[in-house]
Amino acid sequence: MSNATVATPPRGATAAVAQVRYRSQAVAKPYFIAAIGLFIGQIVFGLIIGLQYVIGDFLFPAVPFGTARMVHTNLLIVWLLFGFMGAGYYLIPEESERELHSPRLAIITFWVFLVAGALTILGYLGLPYHELARLTGNDLLPTMGRGYLEQPLITKVGIVLVALSFLYNLSMTLLAGRKTSISIVMMLGLWGLAVFFLFSFVNPNNLVLDKYYWWWVVHLWVEGVWELIMGAMLAFVLVKVTGVDREVIEKWLYLIIAMTLITGIIGTGHHYFWIGVPAYWQLWGSIFSALEPVPFFMMTLFAFNMVKRRRREHPNQAATLWALGTGVMSFLGAGVWGFIGTLSVVNYYTHGTQVTASHGHMAFYGAYVMVVLTMISYTMPLLRGREANCAQAQKVEKTAFWVMTLSIVAITLCLTAAGAVQVWLQRMSAAPLSFMETQERIMPIYWGRWVFGISFFCGLVLYVISFFVTGKRED
């Protein structure tokens, strides 16, 4: 067993001193800090584009809507990747019962990824997109211009190199240490993430093929391999905070992962309804997409069942709350709201409307934002030398949980209402309105969505503040 390290708790902390089992787990800390910083940036740009919906020339031409939206979605992906990487650097050494293969490589990878990401965002904001494409070699291998994959060629190559470095580091750690179900599922998810990203370099001239392979990145990330990562992270935290036998949690994990892969892979077909592929995808996509809520419902049962059977009352009650919230909100966002528009007979009317956006917002928050915040909530106190934050800090964090979660529910309901109105007025009415006339009718709902966006941002600020709250000094 490698040497452990104990950080000195700050003056005024009331929580018991705890230790990180392996010194190299400390490399997760900068990844988590960067993730939260980029998360704040993502929400700021979300508020900008929310305001641009109702005040069309807000910040124009300095920050056009298309640019702000691109920054908003790219920051989402990048900060979640930072969160997954930080989770990997903490989880794999703990599960493998050995130090990380190369902490120095992990720190180098962190700075390369952070600087490359920052330069890319600055490129989006400072240059016309076509000029950015010309300067970064898009003529050599055209890969830009597609949603979520707008990154310049040089950035995509950098992401691949960062991913290979990260996966090499974790794989060598795992191979040299103990193998557990949690660590194996985590590594399968992380390797899958890297492999499917390679399809971002595939950009056929045929638009149907382009969309066909584009979904191999976008869908098979968020409704495939990312769910493996999510399941492993949630299982890891539940093992720690409940004390339930590992074997019980691992059986649940295997069942959830099997259902995820079965429904998620073939469920890709619900994106193929109207892109020009054979009509049988409307049947297969509908059937397996209808089954996609099942693994998320199982995850909810899993989280609550493990907490109910817990053998200890872990002092980090905030992390336990985030874990339970992940199960519930992922089921609602990815499961229930995903199902709303996934059958082909319904999707015929709802695709490309705010119904899709409502699903996207709650699903990303419920499944991936919350599981990363769960991991941060559990690990950051340990990385700072205590088992849990003090009672006052946890009270602030729990308040942040409820403010953010209720805000995203309200945002989702606003977008659902906007989508329903949009479908009725623009696509199902006997006298359909034009797109712009329809948007004008929805404007009050967009204002409501923006107000709840402000409250979500306030909840995020509270979450950050909670890590700086200290209790009264114990004598």
Image (cartoon, rainbow, N blue to C red):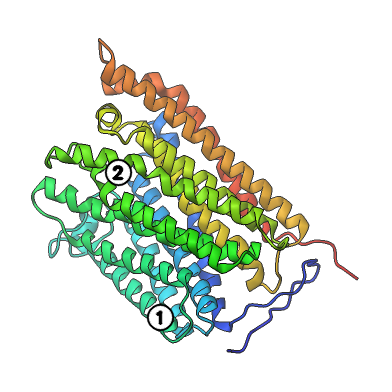
Which residue sits at x=66%, y=67%?
381
In the image, is residue 231 above or below residue 23?
A: above
Figure quadrant of residue 435: top left
Task: State the residue in front, 390 or 61.
Answer: 390
Q: Which mark, by number, is residue 384? A: none
Image quarter in which the C terminus is found: bottom right
Secondary element under disc 1, as helix, strand or loop, is helix
Q: Which mark, by number, is residue 169? A: 1
346 displayed left or right of 407: left
Q: For the residue marked with disc 2, what is the amino acid?
A: Phe
Task: State the residue in front, 353 or 337.
Answer: 337
Task: State the residue in front, 404 or 129.
Answer: 404
Figure quadrant of residue 376: bottom right
Task: Name the residue beneath numbered marker 2.
Answer: 288
Nearer the observer: mark 1 or 2; the answer is 2
Which residue sits at x=27%, y=56%?
217
Where residue 454 appears, as percent x and y from the top left, is 55, 39
Dot 2 alpha-carbon crowd within 10 angstroms: few under 14, some 14 to 19, many 20 or more:
many
In the image, is residue 179 above or below residue 371?
A: below
Where residue 273 appears, as percent x and y from the top left, is 20, 38
346 displayed left or right of 183: left
Where residue 465 appears, as percent x and y from the top left, is 66, 55
